[in-house]
Image: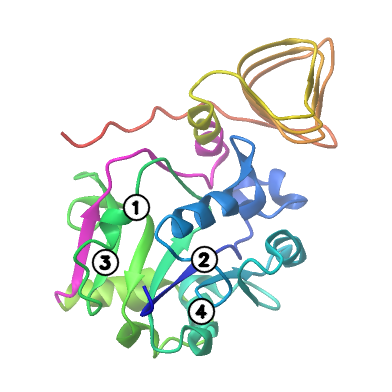
Amino acid sequence: MDALCAVVLAAGQGTRLRPLTEYRPKALCPVGNVPLLDRALGHVAALGLTGSSSVAVNACYLGEQIVEHVGDRVHVSVELGDPLGTAGGIGKLRDWIGGRGVLVGNADAYLTGDIAPLLSGWDGESVRLLGRWAPDEPYGFSGHQFAGYSLLPWRYVRDLRPEPGELVKAVWRPAEAAGELTVATYRGTFLDTGTPRDYLSANLDAASFRNLFANGARVTGTCDQAVIGEGAVVEGRVTRAVVWPGAHVAPDEHLVDAIRAPHDVTVLASPTPLPVDQP
């Protein structure tokens, strides 16, 4: 692992999740009462990558919340102004990466399975993506849908610049064209939580489609497939919904297929049917 580091991308604005992300960056939105960023750091830690010399997180939109949340657990790269994108964010970290290969993860990727197959047999020279089998995906790779994590060799990282750009154009597609991209098949549940629909589905899956109450939640109402955050108060009915920490559901309310945040912010969303694993 000495020749490998990890970067969790957490700088995005989360525009598709607004108004939920007007007060909280997408990377800190809770799924199953755990911030998405902490879930991503957990996947990385399971591979033996921990500490500020081995793991970095980038931050931009509401970046002060990211900085406060991670503390000294990881190295933090703060992007001023607008986010640099996935390639620009890696480019800004070139000196910290310093010749190593990079495991890159999207903070908003919800996965339940092991990502270790991504590293199995990697030669350190090719680009590798974690992907779910999806032969009909129009923007896929070798019949797979990208599942949130990739491996980049240093020779593909060293020329990236701290300027706006995306890995799909700067690295993945060029590597694919050169015959230097492979896909490791991922067989667990994967959701890109960038939309309210998929964000709600990830929460329900994290709760095993049952009720999940955080410590400090006060529930006097009725819940069915509900994820209730710390300090939330539920006096009414909650069905297939998420109630964020500190949010409130009044006695005369029935919250259905929705996310409730503080300040009475409510976003409606029908859950997404979860994909079936490849046979």
The spot of residue 188 in percent (x, y) is: 33, 39
First reached walking from the N terminus: tag 3 or tag 2: 2
Does 157 lie within the magenta span?
no
From the image, state whether disc 3 or disc 4 is nearer to you.
Answer: 3
In the picture, measured across the screen, residue 191 lies left or right of residue 85, that is: left
CA gap, disc 2 to disc 1? Answer: 16 Å
Quarter of the figure that contains the N terminus: bottom left
Residue at label 3? Answer: 128
Type of amino acid under label 1:
Ile
The spot of residue 200 in percent (x, y) is: 56, 32
The spot of residue 125 in percent (x, y) is: 23, 80
Question: Which of the labelled discs sits on residue 50, or is there none?
Answer: 2
In the picture, measured across the screen, residue 72 lies left or right of residue 216, that is: left
CA gap, disc 2 to disc 4? Answer: 23 Å
Does 194 lie within the magenta span?
yes
Type of amino acid under label 4:
Gly
Residue at label 4? Answer: 88
Type of amino acid under label 3:
Arg
Q: Residues within 10 Å of mark 3 (few under 14, many from 20)?
A: many
Q: Residues within 10 Å of mark 2 (few under 14, many from 20)?
A: some
**Residue drawn at x 79%, y 29% as measured from the top left:** 216
Which region shows up in magenta?
179-200
In the picture, measured across the screen, residue 47 lies left or right of residue 269, that is: left
First reached walking from the N terminus: tag 1 or tag 4: 4
Q: Would you say residue 139 is visible in this rendering?
A: no
Q: For the residues labelled 1 and 3, say whether their Cβ atoms are less than 8 Å apart.
A: no
In the figure, 140 relative to 222: above or below? below
